[in-house]
Amino acid sequence: MIDVRTQPIAPTSIRWLDRGDSIDTHRHSDHQVVYPASGVLTITTDRGSWIATPTSVIWVPSGVAHAHAAHGELELHLVGVPATTATTGLTEPVLRSVTPLLRELILECTRVAEADTPRRRRLVAVLVDQVRSAPPAHGHLPAPTSLLLRDVCGILARDPADSRTLAALGRDVGASERTLSRLFHAELGMTFPQWRTRLRLHHALELLAEGGSVTSVAHRCGWSSPSAFIDVFRRAFGTTPSGYRRPAARAALRT
């Protein structure tokens, strides 16, 4: 059993992480808003993983054990939200798109991590309201619970380019295609192709942040061609992989 450390107070701070850096599994008694102003961040819990870029923010409720992993040079903004703050509708980890106002609120909160003051409480209240109302963002990869599905998902996580059918993967783990298909719907709320596409997009964002070319990322993540990768990426994130990597284009997405 993993010993998960608990921090009674979720810190409000700015942290800089290098490529490959991580923060081990921990939990807070407070809630926390997590925003990568640069780079790509993956947060993993027993419920799945969430991947955030400078166009998205992650809400981590109090008590949820989670770990961080950095991809690329990461400028990480953390805002602690007292557990007593009204957070209706934010009982689970969520990924939200960053609006211009939400981004400025996060930057203001982390620019000076002041003590608990009336001004601070007002800022945090507006910040929470903005997180609650911000549009959902792509980037959540739910985690399976059954052993059979964990085996299948583990095979693909180790090699996203594995293009075998669900029936072929089922033969490896000793389950029928029908059984596995039913488990994908019941446990993950989506079809096998939908989950595999999300997994590949997760890996693609990580590899792009670490400097991979569009062509190499497409092949390493299992797309048949760069054009097929670009099409799926554009439909998911509203821009091309090359557009996502250009700082000016990423800034434009926030306006």
Image: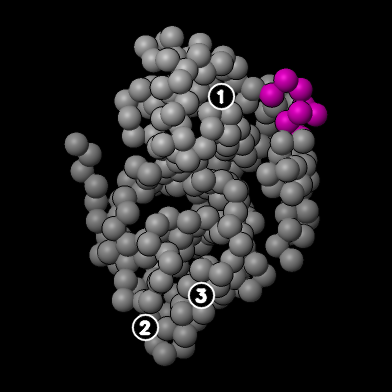
> Which colouring convention does the figure follow?
one colour
Q: Which residue does the image show at 45% across and 47% down from the upper left?
A: 43
Distance from Cα at disc 1 to Cα at disc 2: 46 Å
Classify residue 147 as left or right of residue 195: left
| Magenta stretch, residue numbers | 223-230
Q: Which amino acid does label 3 sit on?
A: Asp
Q: Which amino acid does label 2 sit on?
A: Asp
Q: Do the residues labelled 2 and 3 touch (CB within 8 Å)?
A: no
- Other-residue count near label 2 (Cα within 10 Å), few / some / many at <14 / 14–19 / ≥20: few
Give the vertical position of 153 relative to 241 (above or below): above
Which quadrant, please, contains the C terminus?
Answer: bottom right
Mark 2 and mark 3 lie on one chain; the one further toward the N terminus is: 2
Q: Which residue does the image show at 39% across and 87% down from the upper left?
A: 117
- Whether 225 is among the magenta residues is yes
Q: Mark 1 points at which residue?
A: 160
Q: In which quarter of the image is residue 102?
A: bottom right
